[in-house]
């Protein structure tokens, strides 16, 4: 399906009239709802505001002749926007506040021995320091216990107790 000038003008008119993308796709024929949304976005047509349930109703003019008038459409509040905001999401939820756990103030960080990979053995801490691609990269190298690959300090950093993980959620 090609977007001819006439179809684009009809799209703009129907969009301005407040029709949904599905309704516009049906009226245009041979085009999907998603194609209409994509074209609206590329044309940077303004988003339409939501109608409120307490909107004022349009008054009907009294008929002075014997010809019945078609019912007028209710007025609609439309917010003016700039740019392609037809697909912009609107969130009413408040942001989630996350609790940040801080380590105790009395923790002493050991001074690293700055060992290279070939200097490590089964009793040295294998905590990496820095960027592995840089010349200054090294490992902690302090005495590691029997329980794992890290010294006491780095073990506390690497292994968080289950109770603290649950509390952080």
Image: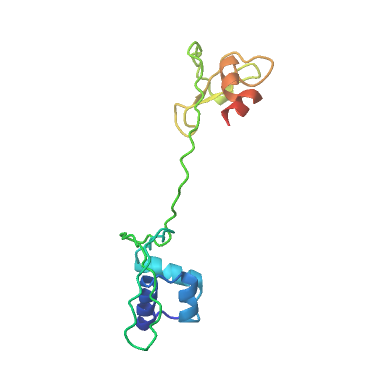
Across the whole image, how many numbered discs are drawn on residues? Answer: 0
Query: If the image is split into quadrants, where does the C terminus sit?
Result: top right
Provide residue 20's location: percent of width, then percent of height.
Answer: 46, 70
Of 118 and 68, which appears nearest the observer? 68
Can you give x and y, in whole percent of width and height, for residue 130 in the image? 47, 28
Give how far across and how far down residue 49 sits, in percent.
38, 60
In this rendering, is residue 118 above or below 34? Answer: above
Kindly give the residue lying farthest to the right in the view shown: 146
Which quarter of the picture shows residue 39? bottom left
Q: Which residue is drawn at 39% across and 65% down?
A: 41
Identity of the residue furthest to the bottom in this view:
66
Name which residue lies at 45% across and 75% down: 24
Front one among 79 and 89: 79
Residue 37 higher or lower than 164, as above or below: below
Asked if residue 161 can be seen in this view, the reply is no
**Image quadrant in which you'd find residue 86:** bottom left
Residue in the image at 36% along x and 67% along y: 75
The quarter of the picture where residue 55 lies is: bottom left
In percent of width and height, residue 23 lies at 48, 74
Of residue 63 and residue 36, the one placed in the foreground of this image is 63
Q: Can residue 16 be seen in this view?
A: yes
- The answer to whether residue 122 is above or below residue 14 is above
Color theme of the render: rainbow
Q: In this view, does 140 lie to the left or right of 8?
A: right
Question: Which one is in front, 144 or 93?
Answer: 93
């Amino acid at each position: 399906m090609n977007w001819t000038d006439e179809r684009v003008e009809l799209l703009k008119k129907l969009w301005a009239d407040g029709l949904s993308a599905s309704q516009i796709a049906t009226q245009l024929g041979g085009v999907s709802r998603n194609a209409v949304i994509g074209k609206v976005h590329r044309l940077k047509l303004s988003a339409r505001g939501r109608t409120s349930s307490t909107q004022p109703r349009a008054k009907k003019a009294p008929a002075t002749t014997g010809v019945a008038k078609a019912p007028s459409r209710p007025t609609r509040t439309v917010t003016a926007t700039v740019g392609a905001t037809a697909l912009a999401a609107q969130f009413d939820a408040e942001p989630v506040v996350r609790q940040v756990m801080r380590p105790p103030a009395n923790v002493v960080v050991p001074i690293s021995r700055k060992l290279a990979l070939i200097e490590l053995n089964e009793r040295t801490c294998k905590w990496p320091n820095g960027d592995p691609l840089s010349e200054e990269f090294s490992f902690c190298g302090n005495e590691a216990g029997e329980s794992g690959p890290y010294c006491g300090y780095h073990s506390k950093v690497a292994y968080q107790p289950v109770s603290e993980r649950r509390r952080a959620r």
